[in-house]
Image (cartoon, helix red, strand yellow):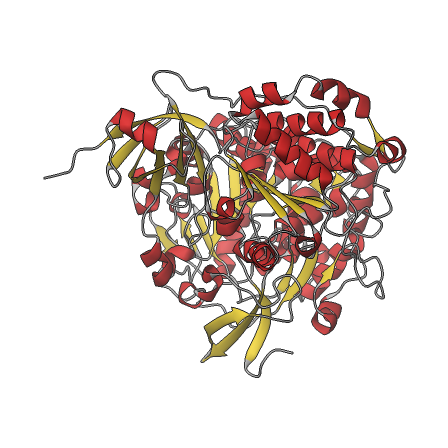
Amino acid sequence: MPDAGWRATLCPYCGVGCGLLVAVEDGRVARVKGDPAHPSSLGDVCAKAVHLPPTLRTPDRLLYPQVRARRGTPLERVPWELALRSTAERLRAVIDEHGPAAVALYASGQLTTEEYYVAGKLARGFIGTNNFDTNSRLCMASAAIGYARSFGADGPPCSYDDLDAADCVFLVGTNTADCHPVLFKRLRRRKLAAPDEVFVIVADPRWTETADLADLHLALRPGSDIALLNGMLHVLRRQGRLDGEFIARHTLEWSAVAQVIEDYPPERAAALTGLSAEAIVMAARRFGDARAALTLWSMGVNQSHAGTDKNAAILNLHLATRQIGRPGAGPFSLTGQPNAMGGRETGGLAHLLPGYRKVADPIARRTVEARWGVPPGTIPTRPGRSALEIFDGLASGEVRAVWIVCTNPAASMPDLDTVERALRQADLVIVQDAYHPTETTRFADVLLPAAQWPEKDGVMTSSERRLTYLPQLVEPPGEARPDAEIFVGFAREMGWKAAFPYESTAEIFDECAALTAGTPCDYAGVSHARLRAEGPLQWPVPTACHPGTGRLYADGRFPTPDGRASFVAVEHAEPLEPVDPRFPLVLTTGRVRDHWHTLTRTGKAPALVRRTPEPVLEVHTRDAASLGLQDGDFVEVTSRRGKAVAQCRVSDAIRAGTCFLPFHWGRELGFYKSANNLTLSGRDPLSGQPELKACAVRLRRLEPVA
């Protein structure tokens, strides 16, 4: 039980899903610490969570609804009743003139499961559009598609406990120390306590704190992950380290992969990755010798035009060696947002319906339509627009209205000039947020003040499929309302009150949970009351007496018609934008430990801002010397789309030919601080996830201002 005066909840930052204890004084969050009773984090906590209190009641909290009478006029405060009526009238006018496909909703992994569910029901079942997507598209879409393509359904099969059981941990495309620090600390404790028990491999162009823990650091070229993974699988096959019986009994399509990996001997894989053949052989041997091998990955794999293929290459490696479904063994994607998993479960991507159902499946549509009480054929038959396609549609005029909820695409999207142009051209921009101004709220025609953590209650799902209930601990400031309450109020204003009768988030969750029954992410046996009484649970939890499921596929059966997983043959593909004499370096982007996404929250924590006040460009010593750069110089970074300016850090901690810039800073904090001035909007053809990890740039030293 929590200490007296402390209330248990969940961290609102990354997908680790750390349990927190919160002390409330005078109606405000006063202190935050780790919750030893929460199974995901066991009392550990990172600096971002500790410094949550000052981020909640700030001068820029959005307190009241605001509306523009027309484009170009100032936002004016209005009562909630008028704000909802205005939103309903203006959206109805767009639908009447252009049809429901001209409307799009773009939401966030910060939403609770109940909020996701109501938003999706509203969009698909009542507005009549599948244009409902979320910023998970920038984060985890390639992993979601990858799992479904290979295993038959989305969902990481592992648990955090596997970090304590694995004897080989392979981290690829993840700077876990900065992005998932509590998990990294768990791995580091294990490694330091018994260094010979676990072999750590890190594949990353940068030498980070994560790489510093590695027994083997593979500083590969950005974008060459498939060549590395295919090369490792080639070595394992050549050395007879595959599990032929598992392949024969539990998988399909191995022959196609076997044929492809013949073309990836260590020498060719070395040429493509920039690594040595010996390093690739060592990585393969260590993986193949492991009793239990665990692979962790994140945005460095997913944010690519070949992201789903990179995921397939990871899953191929695990299927071929039977490193799945056992303690310490499995492929484990690390989710970026606190409830990106909940969003996927409830249909929070443009091709999904609740329970991992597919929009294109007529049986799935009929099931959901029946539950929502709408006529058959109400839900459009084709997937809606994914995140970048929503903004493409706004720019082309095919989408006329967008409702943006709890996210900041005018800072987080690639190629920001295109995003801003799309928002300026929209007929109607509705933004629902806790803060104003942000890069996105300044484009709003309607501005709706939202409650945030811990001013509302609901459920979130972590990377290990663990559902945690978050209680409301304080009242929201001003007239801010929970997002679910806003959606329900809008639905009633549109005349759909009978379909949105909810008086509590518990009622919403029950309806959503019932729709997961019989699906791979079944948590029909979960309720708010059970989570409050028993604590967090890992799905599947099909009945009220089921204890939850720590590990998927332990029986070797997968959620496919014949119970078998599928190998997917994939080939190396170079980044979309090659370097050339004009743009000779590859820029990769990512997070830093002290900040979160677009700074709308961590940028208000004084201690975090003091520690990391500005973006810093990492440049290799050799590249700096060729350009006349010294450590600490200010540098102009130019791509084919725009420019950014940052102070540089010169070292050997990044691969030559590559530079790194964190993406947190948007244009609101200085136009040329934004890394997304530079990035490109090319994307994976299956997942729609943009290639944020590689674009071609040039650097120029800026002379000091006298």
Q: Nearer the viewer, residue 152 or 505?
A: 152
- Residue 143, by quadrant, is top right
Question: Is residue 684 among what the camera can see?
Answer: no
Q: Quadrant of the N terminus?
A: bottom right
Q: Position of residue 229 (x, y in %)?
A: 64, 30
Give the vertical position of 178 relative to 259 (above or below). Answer: below
Q: Nearer the viewer, residue 614 or 184?
A: 184
- Farthest bottom residue in view: 4
Give the vertical position of 522 relative to 96 (above or below). Answer: below
Question: Is residue 252 among what the camera can see?
Answer: yes
Give the vertical position of 51 relative to 592 (above or below). Answer: below
| Residue for point 59% across, 70% down | 35
Q: Position of residue 134 (x, y in %)?
A: 58, 43
Q: Position of residue 265 (x, y in %)?
A: 65, 20
| Residue for point 67% across, 17% down | 263
- Residue 504, by quadrant, is bottom right
In the image, is 400 to the left or to the right of 518?
left
